[in-house]
Structures are given as structure tokens and as C-alpha cells.
Image (tube, rainbow, N blue to C red):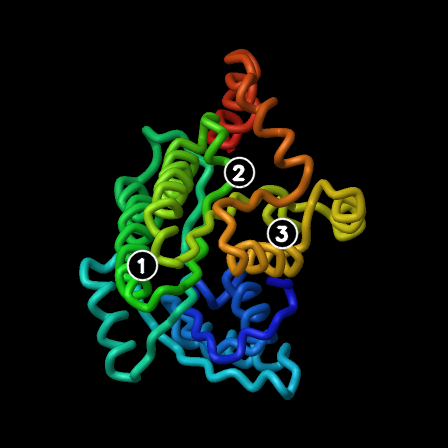
Amino acid sequence: MANNKSLKNHLALVTGAAGGIGLEFSKVLAARGADLIILDLNLQRLQKARDEILLNCKQEADPSIFLLQADLTDPDFLGKIDDYCTQNSLNPDILINNAGIFSFNPIDTTDSKLIETFIDLHVRAVTLLSRWFTTRRKGEGNGWMLNMSSMSCWMPMPGLAMYASTKSYIRVFTRSLHYEMKDYGVGVTVACPGGIATDLFGLPQKWKRFAVAIGVLQTPEAFASKAIGKMMKKRKQYINGWLNRVSIFFVGILPTKIRMMVKHQMLDKGIAR
């Protein structure tokens, strides 16, 4: 399926949709004609995101956008989503599990509440939403799901214990579910992004543009478009950029000395500040 093929008559549920990559996913889907359920914590941010999504659309797309304020760390978040879909007669055939958090801290100084949030968002919510969606779609004989992992799932580095391990769970879980759903016509894809040109790296704009030009970084818009293209083709995995694919091997063989250098030069000094 071509990356620009119309998605009219499709309905996508996107979590963490009020900003970042989640908003980019929503823009790409809506621009191709898909209706949306955008889910996030903050209703005001969702309203602003809806306006931005519609502004990005061509007139012929004209998507319907439903706002769902929900906290995926709540014990009954799935009941709220299910009730919302039932009450509004919505049956999404696309799911993007995008909501997540990041921190760079040693595990012994990471707040226990933050640890619980990592597990709730990256493990519990992804698992339960994936099960909810695939159970509904296997009876329909179609469906497309994209779960967001990270390049860090191959990087057991100091400071990334919670992030890398929970993103690793997402990758392994999604790859297994891909095979479980294959006979039912439901596509399950995991994306493992690395090197996205956001403000996370603190690079000046000229260096961001240079990094994008040589393929070291990818724009959020390009990543979202390509990831959705892979999802609609029902590929099992998408890793953006040649450098990221090559680096998996080299990061895997890094000696302990280098990993400890990361700890001493980045993590320990960060704590000292």
C-alpha cells in the first residue's frame, strides 16, 4: 500500500496524540482521510491538537476527530475507552500505541511512582489496549496496529534501565503478536525509532538540518509517514534510517569500559549538577 493512499473510511485511535510523534501520526492519518480518536491526558491540549490537525489537512480530507481525555495509568482506563467507543458507535480499525515517557536516571534514584508509570504506560497499557483491539479486529478479518518501541530496546545502558527494558518488552510483545494475528488478517507492527530531529538532542537548527540531510536524523513528519506506511503494509518491524540499523550491532558489542564511561561522564555528572 502506497504511503499516500487514501485512508477514507478508516478510523484510527492514537494515544499520546496531543503532541510530539503522536500528533505527527494524527496529522498523517487525517491528511490521508482517516477519521481519528485522539487520546491524551489534557483536554485543552487535545483541542489545540485537533485544530492543528485540521489546519494541516486538505479540504477534501475532512476527517471527523473525536477527543478522548484519559489517563492510561488509571486502573480502569480500558473500560473508559471501551465505553467511549460504544456510546459513540465507534469501531477503530487502526490503533497506534504511542503514549510513553522518558527519563535518564539510575534506577536507585528513580522515584517509585515514576517506575510504576513506566510499567503502566509501556507494559500494562500497551498490552491491554493491544489485546482489546486485536480481539475486536480478528472477528472483522482486518485491522492495523502500530506499537512504539525505541532503538533503546537494544541498548542496556546506564541511566536507561526502565526506558530500555520496557521498550524492549514492547518490541518482543509486538513481534509475537504479529505472528498470532497473521492468520486473522490483522497487521501488527512495531516501530523502533532512533535519531528523530526533535528538541530532545538540543542541537542547533543548522546541525539538525545537516543531520537530516546525511541521514543521521529523520524529521518527525518523515518518520510518522514512513511508519504508517509500514503499518498499512502489515510489516512486522520498522527501524528508521540506515545508521540506526547498523548501530544495533555496534551498540550490542560495546565493552563494559565504554558503558561505564557513559555512566561516569553523563550520569554521575548529571546527578552532581
Relative to 233, is 171 on the left or the right?
A: left
User: Of the residues under marks 3 and 1, which one precedes in the sequence?
Assistant: 1
Provide the residue designation for mark 3. Answer: 199
Residue 234 in the image, given as x and y percentages of width and height: 49, 54
Q: Residue at x 25, y 79 (%)?
A: 86
Image quadrant in which the N terminus is located? bottom right
Q: Residues within 10 Å of mark 2 (few under 14, many from 20)?
A: many
Tell which tag, 2 or 1, sits nearer the viewer.
1
Measured as percent of width and height from the top left, residue 173 is found at 35, 42
Alpha carbon separation for disc pair 2 and 3: 17 Å
Task: Return the mark for residue 151.
Answer: 2
Q: Which is in the foreground here, disc 3 or disc 1?
A: 1
Question: What amino acid does circle 1 point to?
Answer: Thr
Quarter of the image where one finds residue 54 = bottom right
SS type, badge 1: helix
Kind of residue at badge 2: Met
Q: Name the side, left or right, on which 163 lies relative to 267.
A: left
Q: Secondary structure at mark 3?
A: helix
Looking at the rendered structure, the secondary structure element under dot 2 is helix
Numbered mark located on residue 134 in the image? 1
